[in-house]
Image (spheres, rainbow, N blue to C red):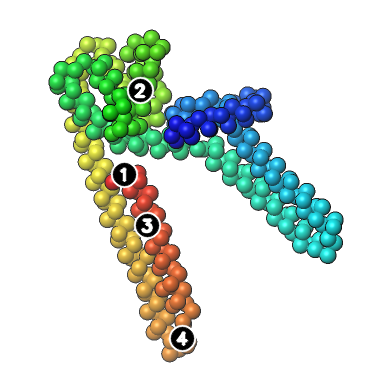
Amino acid sequence: MNSDQKFLFSRAAAFSYRLFGKAAEKIKLPFLSRNLKKSRLYIPAVLYQSFILSVLFLIALIGILMEISLFFLALSNRAAEEQIKKSAVLICIVTVLLIMSTGAFLFFLPYFKACDLKIKIEQQLPFAVNYMAAMSIAGVPIENIFHSMSQRRIRSVYKELSDEMKTIAVQVNYFGKEYPSALQKLSEETTSPMFAVFILNSKNTMISGGSFQKFIVSKKHEYQSLAVQRKDKYFQTLEMLSEIYITVFLAMPLFFMILFYTMTPLSGPQTGQMTALAYHLVPFLGVIFLLILEIINEKEDV
C-alpha cells in the first residue's frame, strides 16, 4: 500500500467510524488488533472494524435495494412473477455469501499482510546483516548502524526491513526513548520471530557492553547458512513439482488418451473424451501448475 492508498484508506476508515464507531467500540478482537500492529497498516482496530462494518452494510443495502426493485417489478408484471421470485432468492443468497466472504477477507487481511511482511523481512535480513557487519567492522557505532538502516538510500534496497528499522529512529528521536527500550518495543511488535530474536540479541549486547562486531559477524554467517539452506529446499521443491507435473499432469492424460485409442475397435471412437483431455484438461492442469510456481517464486523472491 503506497502513501496515497494509505491516505484514502484512512479517510474511508475515519468516515466509517462516524457511522459505526459506537458499534465497533463494543467489539473486542485482540487477534485483529495484534495483526494490525504487525502488518504495519498503522490504523487503530476500532477504525478498521468500523470500515468492515460499513463495507458489509453497503453490500447489504445494495442487496435490499435490488430486492425492493424486484418486488415492484413483480407487482407490475404478474406474468413473470415466478421468474422474479427465483431472481429474488438468488440475489438474497448471493448477498449473504458476499457479506460472509467479504467480512472474512477483511478480517484476515491484516494477518495475510503480516505473513507476507514476515517472509520479505526474513528474505532481506541475511543481506542486511551482511551490510551491517561491514559497517561494524569499519568502526561505526551500533546506534549509527541502526539509524543508517532506516535512511532512504537503504530503503530502496531493503524496503520492508528498513521500515521496521525506522520505528527505532521514531521511538528514539520523537518519543525520547533509549535505544534498548526502542529495540525491545520493536521485538514485541515485529511479525518476524527471526528478526525479533536478532533485535533482542542486539539489545542484550548493547546493555551488557559486549562486542557488537563479534555478534553481528556471527549472525552474518548464521543467516547466510540459513539462506543457503532455504534455497536448497526451494530447489528440492521445484524438483519434486517437476516430477509431479510429468507424472500426473502429462503422463496420466496421455495414458488415458492411449487407452481410449486402443478401445476404439471395441467401443467405437472416443473423440469427445480425447478432445476433452487434449484441449481442456491438459491446458487447465498446466495453468494450475503455473499458478503454483508463481506462488512459490513470489515467496522465494527469485
* First along the sequence among labels 1 and 2: 2
Instruction: Specify the amino acid type for callout 1.
Output: Glu
Mark nearer the viewer, 4 or 3: 3
Quarter that holds the N terminus? top left
Badge 3 crowding class, 10 Å Cα cut-off, few under 14, some 14 to 19, many 20 or more, is few
The local secondary structure at tag 1 comes to helix
147 relative to 94, above or below: above
Q: CA distance from mark 4 to mark 1?
A: 47 Å
The local secondary structure at tag 4 comes to loop
243 relative to 273, above or below: above
Q: CA distance from mark 4 to mark 2?
A: 69 Å
Instruction: Specify the amino acid type for callout 2.
Output: Lys
Residue placed under numbered mark 1 in the picture: 300
Using the image, tell me which numbered label, if any, was put on residue 166.
2
Using the image, tell me which numbered label, if any, was put on residue 270.
none
Instruction: Specify the amino acid type for callout 4.
Output: Pro
Quadrant for residue 179, please give it: top left
Residue 181's spot in the image, x, y percent?
36, 13
* First along the sequence among labels 4 and 1: 4
Q: CA distance from mark 3 to mark 1?
A: 15 Å
